[in-house]
Image (cartoon, rainbow, N blue to C red):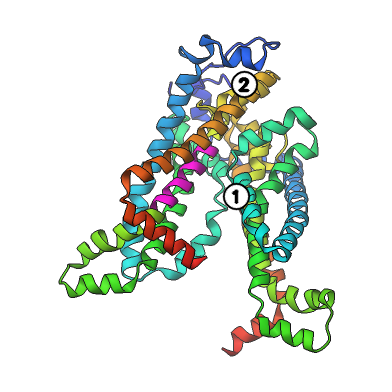
Amino acid sequence: MNGAARPTQAAVRRDIGFFEWFFSADTWWGNNGILESLRETVVLCAAVTLVAVVLSVPVASVLAHLRRAELSTTWLVSISRAVPTFAIAALLVPWSLRSGRGFEPIPIFTALLLLALVPIYLNTYTAIRQVPEGAVDAARALGETELSILTRVELALAASLVFAGVRVAAIQVVATEPIRAFLGGDGLGRYVRDGIGQSNNTLVVGGIVLIGGLAALTGLAFVVLERLVLPNGVRRLARQQGKRTT
Amino acid sequence: MAVSLLAQARNPIIRWEWIIEEWHQIQSAIFEHLRLTVLAMLLGLVVSAGLAAIALRYRWTLTPITATTSLIYTLPSVALFALLAPVFGNLSLYTAVLPLAGYTLLILVTNIVAGFQAVPPSVRDAAEGMGFGPARRIWTVDLPLALPFIVTGIRIATVSTVGMVTVAAIIGQGGLGRLIFSGLRRAFWTPMTVGASLSIILALLLDALILGVGVLLTPWARRRRATS
């Protein structure tokens, strides 16, 4: 539980075929089953994305509203694709263990959070800056307070792009989370890890299918969620803006 | 990885004597890290240059090329390294270099295309008016003007590749990533800390190096900055 790595390696026959393994009930249920790993991965990724949204969106929207921090935002664009998630997590593991907090969740959580913060911040910032000035001026002329302009005009019109940022962040988090299995944790990455360790290609392929599948599903889930949550008008506006800018 | 809690708690984060004693190991890890980074970047650049040339010549291909490279970019790194391991074998160079190069494509293609598109049409017309053929115009007029964009792309791609190389350690490669794993297995934190921090330092150094080369290659940009 805390500290020592759990001996969770599933003993799987080496000659088992992929389909036989993937479609047997034992593979999915139980303590070492796929469902348990899936739960671990989804819980961590959802928590990371949620915290990233809570931290990024308010900061980015206030700064964009005040037209501040433009330079540091362009600087963020260039580092956004270069966050060394694995190195950050690895640096934090010894510290976390020595202070009695175990392999998880602090190192992997922090590393994934740094990865997720950037796209959400950037999308929120640029989205709010793209809001037509006429709309903001009109709201101001109607006597709306700055806070209400920010939340009810700017954020409302920017919602679609903010959503896109959250989607990109979530996909990146899901795609990167499997490194956790190589840093003393579990999650879906464990099938790749155990497969490599036991030279069992069935497990490796199974892990790849599961990780890739979850990443694809995450993208899809956000498309559906956007349809459910955002009003049609906002989405149509975003499409028009997209056409105009590209 | 069955290590006692006691050992984990007792080992210091960093033991400086180890770094001196095992310097040759650290050195070879740095070289392997650099070698994988450079090979992946070279392969990525060649492929990106080709893709960018196609996208610039036939505009309709830009969307599918961008879509494909972004798809590659979002592929889970652990899965991609593991995917090629059974094909080429764990220790084959292809297993590590191909995914690494694949991840650079999106950034490089986007920046190369943006660079060439940013060349002012008037400059292009002037070059043609002076009798430059297409090949000579691209090499001596378009390419230098596109260089700042391309250099930025190379910087971002290099920094992200250095970070990604550590993940290649899951298939037994990955230079400094191997140090991280050997430390983790023995609950001996020094190699782990050294490997992780050196990979970050290496990324920053390469970034500064490429930035410097870019400034040297585009002296006119510096002059303009100085006068304005």
Q: Residues within 10 Å of mark 1 (few under 14, many from 20)?
A: some
Instruction: Give the chain of mark 2.
Output: A
The residue lying toward the viewer, choosing from A97 and A141, is A141
- The quadrant where residue B209 appears: bottom right
Residue type of the residue flagged with mark 2: Asp
User: Which x, y percent locates residue A216?
Assistant: 52, 37
Q: Is residue A166 magenta?
A: yes
Q: Total marks drawn?
A: 2
Q: Start and end of the magenta stretch? A: A162-175
User: Which x, y percent locates residue A243?
Assistant: 48, 63
> Visible in this render: residue A193?
no
- Residue receiving disc 2: A194
For image coordinates 42% across by 52% down, the residue present is A120
| Residue B74 to residue A129: above or below | above
For image coordinates 33% across by 58% down, the residue present is A59
The residue lying toward the viewer, choosing from A224 and A101, is A224
Residue type of the residue flagged with mark 1: Ser
Instruction: Give the chain of mark 1.
Output: B
